[in-house]
Amino acid sequence: MNLAIRRGFLWPSFEIYGGQSGFYDLGPLGVLLKNNIVELWREVFVKQHQEFVVEIETPIINPAIVFKASGHEEHFTDYAVECTSCHRIFRADHLIEEVLGTNAEGLSEEELNKIIKEHNVRCPVCGGELSTVKKFLLLFQTYIGPYSLENLAYLRPETAQGMFINFKRVYELMKRRLPLGIAQIGKVVRNEISPRQGPIRLREFTIMEIEFFYDEKNPQCELLDERCSDNKIYILTAEQRIQGETKPISILPSEAYKEKIILSPWLAYWMCIAGKFVNMLGIPLEKTYFEEKLPTERAHYSKQTFDQMVLVDKWGKLEVSGHAYRYSYDLERHIVFSKSDLYAVRQLKEPLIVRKRVAKYDKVAILKLFGKQAGDVFKKLAKYSPEELLKILESSQRDEIEIEGMKIPRTVFTVEDVEEKIWVEKFIPHVAEPSFGAERLMYITLEYAYRELEGGRVVLSLPKKLAPIKVGIATLIDKPQFEALASRIYNMLKMKYYVVILEGDSIGKKYAYADEVGIPFVITIDYDSVVEGSTVTVRDRDTRKQIRVPIADLAKVIDLGLEGKDITEFGYPVIEPKD
C-alpha cells in the first residue's frame, strides 16, 4: 500500500478534508492498471465468447420499483451496532468476527445480539458499551426529479438488474437463441456500514458481471469438456465448512457438476474461466479456490453461490468474484411487478395437445344482422381471442352482450371444445452469474506482483500485458545528444504504447524506478547508440538481462516480449545484468 500510494496507483479520497472511509481515488498508474484488467476481463469473458455473449450499458440510477421487484429493498441489508459512548457505528457480524474470531455472516438480529451480550463485546475504539443490533439498508437513496416518494430512486448496488430488465430486447436481437450471456461493466455503490479494509471494502467500485441465461431443461454445456478438461479447480464446499474442514478439494468442473457439487453446468463453466482469468493476473492456481456459501450466507436471489477466494498476506483470504446460480428468480419477479413478457420460447420435439373451450362467432349471421355496420363489429371482435370471448359470454346471462359499446346478440356465438397443437412453449430461463470487483482484482494483482530483492530493492513484476507503462526510455547520461535520441524514440513509440522517459541521477536509479512501477522493458541509450545512431539496449524487468536491438526493430521486440516471449531468444546480442 505504501508503494501504491507513493507511486500513484491509488490513495484515500478527499484527503484534504480528512478523508472518507470506503472511497479511494485511482492515480495515473492505477487508472491504467485497472483499465488493463478490465480489458483483459472483456477479452476473456466477452470477446472469446462473442458468439453468445454481448455487452450492454445501463444507468446507475434506477427507479425504486426496480429494486423493490428484485428484492433488494427488502433483503439488501446488514446489521449495524452503535457505541453508546463514542457513537461510532460498526457492522455487527464483522465486529464479532474481529473480536471473537468467529464467522457471524448470515446470523439473525437476535443471534447477533445474543453473542454480543454473552461475550461482552465492546467498542474496539473506546471500550464503550454497544447498542442493540439494528437492520441497515445498504442501498444509496436518491430522487429522480422533485423530492417526493413517487420519484424515489436508488443507486444500483450491482449491474445485474439492468441486464434482467433488458433480457427480452437482447434475446430478440440475438434471434431468440439460448444460451445467451449479457455482460456489463460499470460503477456500483453500496452504503457499507463501516468499511475499514482500505481499498478492499469500498462504497463505490467497478463491477464486471455476466448474467448468463439458459434453458434449464436443455442445460448442456459442451464447453465444459472442450475448454476445461485439463483445468481442475479448488472448491471448499458448504458441507466441508459445516464439518470444520478447511482444505479445498481439487476437481474438474465437469465432475463437480456431475457429482452435484455445483448445481448448474454453466456456473461450473464460468468458475473454470474465472480460475484461468485470475491466473492471468499473476496469481498461482494453488493460491485461489472457490468457497461455497452456507444457506444462511447466500443472497436472497441465489440457490447456490461460490466466492472465488485468493490467499493474501493481510487478511488471509480475499473474495475477488462471486458465482451465483440465480435460477429464474429475477426474471420471475420483474414479470410480476412490470407485467411485461420476459419469457423465452422453447421449440417442442412433439406437439403439445391442448384441449380447451372457446367461443366462435357466425360471420354470415353478423352480416345479416348489422348490414353496413358489420365491418365495425368484425374489427371489435378481432381484438379478442376465442378464450377472451368465452369469458365475456360467461360473465353475462343477457340475450345480448356488450363489446366496446356495441350490443351483439348471443345467438351469433357458439361455444365449442377444440384441440390445439402447440409447437412452442414459453419459459423463464435460468441464470448463472459470474461477478468480479475490478478494484479487488487490482489489489491482488499488485500484491502478487510485489517483490523485495536484496538490499530492499522493490520490483513490481506485473504480468507484462497488464503493466500500466509498457516502455521506459533511459539515457546513460543526461546530455543533449542522448536526450535528442531518447525524444525521437519516445515519439516513435508513444502512439502504440504508454511510454515514459526516465529521470534520475544515475542509470541505476532510473532502472530502480522502472522496476518499482512495473515497467516491463527499458530502452537504454548509451554511447554506442549515440555514435552509431542505430542501436539501443532493451532491458527485461524480471531477468534484468539486456539485448542490443536496432531501433527499427524495437516495436517488434516489445510486441513479442509483451506476449510473454523471452527477448533474449530473439537472436540479438545479450548483455548480462550488472545493475
Image (spheres, rainbow, N blue to C red):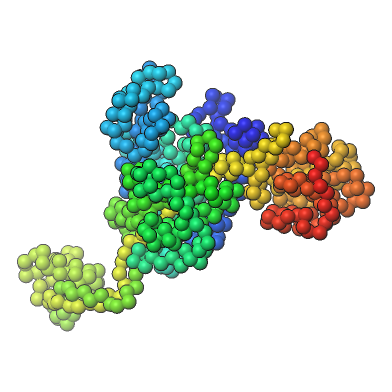
| 111 horizontally vs 284: left or right | left
Quadrant housing the N terminus: top right
Q: Is 442 drawn above or below residue 166 in the view shown?
A: above
Image quarter of residue 258? bottom left
| 21 horizontally vs 566: left or right | left
Percent of width and height locating residue 211: 43, 55
Residue 565 visible from this viewpoint: yes
Q: Residue furthest bottom?
A: 364
Q: Residue furthest right?
A: 531
Name the residue at 66% across, 41% down.
Answer: 460
Count how many numbered circles sit on residues in the image: 0
Quadrant housing the C terminus: top right
Name the residue at 40% across, 22% down.
Answer: 123
Name the residue at 67% across, 37% down.
Answer: 452
Name the residue at 77% across, 40% down.
Answer: 511
Q: Is 492 drawn above or below residue 254 in the view shown?
A: above
Image quarter of residue 262? bottom left
